[in-house]
Amino acid sequence: MQDVMQNLKNKTEFLWINPKNSDQDNSKFSISDIEDARARLDRFAPLLEKLYAQSKKTRGILESPFVAVKDLQDELEKRYGTKLYGKLYFKLDSHLPISGSIKARGGIYEVLQHCENLLLKEGLLKIDDDYSKIANDDIKNFLSKFKVAVGSTGNLGLSIGIMSAKLGFKASVHMSSDAREWKKEMLRSYGVNVVEYESDYSIAVANGRKEAQGDPQSYFVDDENSKSLFLGYSVAAKRLAGQLKSLDIKVDENHPLFVYLPCGVGGGPGGVAYGIKKEFGKYAHCFFAEPTHSPCMLLGMHTQKHNEISVFDIGLDNKTAADGLAVGRASSLVGKIMDTMLEGIYTISDDEMYKLLYLSYEKEDLKLEPSALAGVKGIYHINKLYDKEKLKNATHIAWITGGSMVPDDEMLKYINTAKKLI
């Protein structure tokens, strides 16, 4: 019998299977909510194409590459000493336009939704307008009267700050001690106000929320509870379905889909997993991956205390090289939705993430953040769990959540650290 709490306290790598997984949807969301979010992103596509040169190829639609990583899979088989059935792919949200991480989905979406609401209310925009008009000086001057704030360990702050500043908002990002210095400097280069804390993510969020309260001109993006963020992330599933179809990759009883998502507070992986379950149903199996020092979602779901328990409560320090995953307390919103939709969660050490970073660099020429590699070990866990016949035609997707914007000198440090461990 697996002693889950002891494994968590000992910082042991292990796979936890969710006993409540039933594919039942306990949320108040629906497919129509996801479709509404997708339609809003489509309306903003002309604006994004105008503002960001890197989005011109996709006509303003923010989407990431989907690639097979056969050389890496072959190397993982050698490293883990076992045949890994099925085919491994990377969903490279690390290469999303604008802010180079999965946070470009939910973060940018919520800023755009807020922008749209303000302009519609003021009569400066109509739903059937060409949204590229939002780049005009008169609209930017109007938006400059308003503030947008967020608390972040890094990548969400980048997406919120960059998008808000580009539209004309006054943006403030409250950064926890885990945030990388280069992310702070990048935000400042866009004119974003960066507020630094010596404490962890929860304090940064609480202070950002407090600052925004009582100011009618200020809007706070609440990473712990935001339904808009969640729906922005969920749109990824519809886009993924199109990519699978273009490659003639089936998802059915004989061709199961396994998706491995790095998890911090839970909004990004939760939204993506929710969309995937609504899109593919029982043939899709979603798993989260968390650092051994910061397994807040696993702790919350296993104890059923969700956001009412912190990793500090069981003696963990929430210190990890995976800065985007350095969260001590999980989202209540996401944990309760995932209660019946998530198949499981596994924990992974910093050393293992670094090793996978190095192997991905060596075998696939990809430069990624440590946290982005958390999902890669999922194929190993699932090959131990499932019948090999079931996995022969399986598609495994490691959701790669960040890395393309990391400065070269920082990436070299990651690679050198990883090389020593290998």
Image: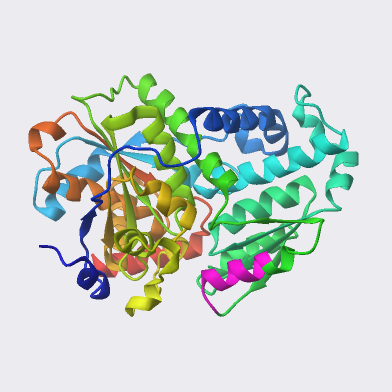
Q: Is residue 213 magenta?
A: no
- Residue at figure coordinates x 49%, y 64% from the top left: 409
63 or 33, nearer to the observer? 33
203 or 87, nearer to the observer? 203
Q: Position of residue 318 (x, y in %)?
A: 40, 73
Give the quarter of the image for residue 42: top right
Identify whether 122 is placed above or below 280.
below
The overriding secondary structure of the stretch rendered in magenta is: helix
Identify whether 379 is placed above or below 392.
below
Give the colour scheme shown.
rainbow
Q: Is residue 317 visible?
A: no
Residue 77 horizontal side relative to residue 245, left or right: left
Residue 52 horizontal side relative to residue 389, left or right: right
Q: Which residues are magenta?
A: 199-209
Q: Is residue 203 magenta?
A: yes
Label total for image? 0
54 or 59, nearer to the observer? 59
Q: Position of residue 352 (x, y in %)?
A: 26, 63
- Residue at figure coordinates x 71%, y 44% from the top left: 114
Q: Position of residue 284 (x, y in %)?
A: 29, 34
- Residue at figure coordinates x 77%, y 24% from the top left: 130
Identify whether 55 is placed above or below 408.
above
- Residue at figure coordinates x 55%, y 55% from the top left: 225
Q: Position of residue 301 (x, y in %)?
A: 34, 58
Of the 4 image quadrants, the one containing the N terminus is bottom left
